[in-house]
Image (tube, grey):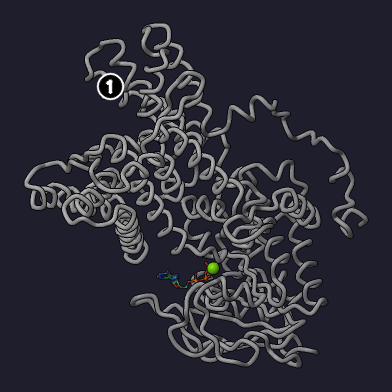
Amino acid sequence: MTALTTPSEAPGAASAPADERLARTHPLVRLLRRPEMGALVAALAIFVYFSVATSAFLSPAGAATWLYSASLFGIMAVAVAMLMIGGEFDLSAGAMTGTTGLLVGAFTTQWGMNLWLAMLLALLIALSVGAFNGFLVVRTGIPSFIVTLGTFFILQGLNLAGTKLVTGQVAIQGMTLVPGFDAGKVIFGSTIPVAGVNLKVSVFWWLGITAVASWILLRTRYGNWIFAIGGQLQSAVQTGVPVKRTRIGLFMGTAAAGWLVGMLSLFDVATVQATTGIGQEFIYIICAVVGGCLLTGGYGSAIGAALGALIYGMILQGIVFAQWDNNWLKAFLGGMLLLAVLVNLSVRRQAGVRA
Amino acid sequence: MSAGVAAPILEVRGVGKVYGSVIALSGVSTSVGAGEVLCVLGDNGAGKSTLLKILAGVHPHSSGELLLDGRPEHFTGPRQALDAGIATVYQDLAIVALMPVWRNFFLGAELSAGFGPFSRLRVAEMRAITLEELGRMGIDLRDVDQPIGTLSGGERQSVAIARAIYFGARVVILDEPTSALGVKQAGVVLRYVAQARDHGLGVVFVTHNPHHAYPVGDRFLVLNRGASLGEFDKDGIKIDELTRLMAGGAELDSLARELERG
Ligand SMILES: Nc1ncnc2c1ncn2[C@@H]1O[C@H](COP(=O)(O)OP(=O)(O)OP(=O)(O)O)[C@@H](O)[C@H]1O
Ligand SMILES: [Mg+2]
């Protein structure tokens, strides 16, 4: 009877600090179970390999190159990872990096709009497209894969046709002549020397965004909601999570990241190709998956996605330094993706999650 | 004896629910007041969960009306019901398998400190509360950081119940909370129901098991094929009558004969 009256005083309950049923997990094992661990190990291996195999890879100029590549992909991959943890995809994310740059270019060089106003306007347009994607998905239940495939083609078409219509060419040039360009370049296109390496400012944006995204995912209510929505939508609804708002917000997040990357490349080279970003949407997804995101949602990490992008950046430039045929990149990427998916699958099992 | 004395907190009048062409519930009236246990009984597919989801704000009713503290109310979602102090244990438990136990416990009602976009989760506090509340349910968990999907069915159910009891300030709704529980844990849940009632909470308790319902219930609503077979005070019905009613009376008698070795 005594054991039943107050369950918490039942013999053995809560009194012993260590539970005999709990196989002791070594802190190292716990660490290894983090979603981003696989990517970290792979990143280290690739880093070591190219450092040894090529002399350019570790040179200051070389390191700056692959870090720059990684940063642009990384910003997108982190935003896409958050969306994927929330259970959705955004195929329009790549084209968005082109659209925003082209918009600012057209507004300023063709119509003489104030640069900052043009950037703000481009951001608002990007956010509206993101909100539109999210709204459509939330409202109709159509898979985001399809909805954003639609917006992807629309943006791709508009980017090309619009650019030709406005400039008669397939690129926008002459940004350097726009008043305020130099000020913008400080924020989005400057170079900061760190330990002898001239790092592009985008690297710092990348690090900052990864940190903020990790904070949001792990230490705020929004993070909790994102994991819940992607993990089990119905449960999130039933526990009163503001599901619609959160999901739409995630789509706006990838759009905003697209804008940022659009600005970073615009101020770096001062021209925008009409084809910018097209075909990169899958690379963001691959980076996120390599970083531990489950394709089914509900699991993953921002740091992992950033590492996935680092891997991509290193391979992209490492292959050039090693003077291999560039086409190896694709094969390599596909292999990485498959490997990552297999590892992630076993993570899900390892987590011991029952059906 | 006390049944019906308390002013109802939640009341439905002639409430109905249509899913497309399926009439899941129609013309059901009932209520639950403070310090009262309403048991909802009925066969599979009788409409019990449907009624509860209306009370919990998960989906709006198609007909009839819902009253909260005597005022007509149209819940726009579970958040609104939760804010009104109505917490629910859903039949599917409303948990997210890959998330840690403590994150599940506080899902949608996370404790946070700080202001606006800078607010952060009070992680240590939430872990401690989860462990404590589960301990009170007789579940001593190895680790509140493990994914909830790794718990046994009964443990998961206990987490969901502990959560509803913790957050339900006025009404606690339980949809078959004892279905996966061991004898001891089922006993704990029944004791919780009684305790909640004694603390002045309204309890809506769905079960298939009249032996669980009868000892704690004040009133019994029996549903069959989406309609009410009647609502009974405890004085008005005996446990075997209740059992017969649930199973459709005569059928059970013939089943008993059939199963008897002859
Ligand atoms: N979302 C839905 N869409 C269509 N029909 C539904 C839906 N939810 C429930 N129904 C139908 O409504 C009826 C009542 O279902 P409900 O879940 O309320 O039954 P229940 O009494 O809770 O049964 P059980 O004891 O098995 O849990 C069933 O016939 C079911 O098929
Ligand atoms: Mg049910």
Residue type (three-letter) at the residue carrying disc 1: Leu
Q: Quadrant of ligand 2?
A: bottom right
User: In this rendering, does residue B250 appear at all?
Assistant: no
In the image: residue A212, left or right of residue A265 = right
Across and down, in percent, residue A19 comes to 79, 36
Pointer 1 residue = A329
Residue B198 lies in quadrant: bottom right
Q: Please name whichever residue, A277 or A194, is drawn nearer the observer in this view of the structure.
A: A194
Q: How many marks?
A: 1
Q: Secondary structure at mark 1?
A: helix
What x and y, as percent, mark residue A50? 39, 12
Relative to A251, A25 lies left or right:
right
Q: From the top left corner, tell me how far across and down residue A191 is, in percent.
A: 41, 30
Task: Work out whether residue A127 or residue A237 is closer to the camera in this orientation and state it.
Answer: A127
State the residue lying farthest toward the right.
A2
Q: Is mark 1 within 8 Å of ligand 1?
A: no
Regarding residue B146, the answer to whether it shows in the image is yes
* Residue at position x 33%, y 77% in the image: B21
Front residue (pair B213, A151): A151
Query: Which part of the image, by quadrant, shows the N terminus of chain A?
Result: bottom right
Image-based side of A77 in relation to A353, left or right? left
x and y percentages locating residue B69 in the rendered image:
65, 89
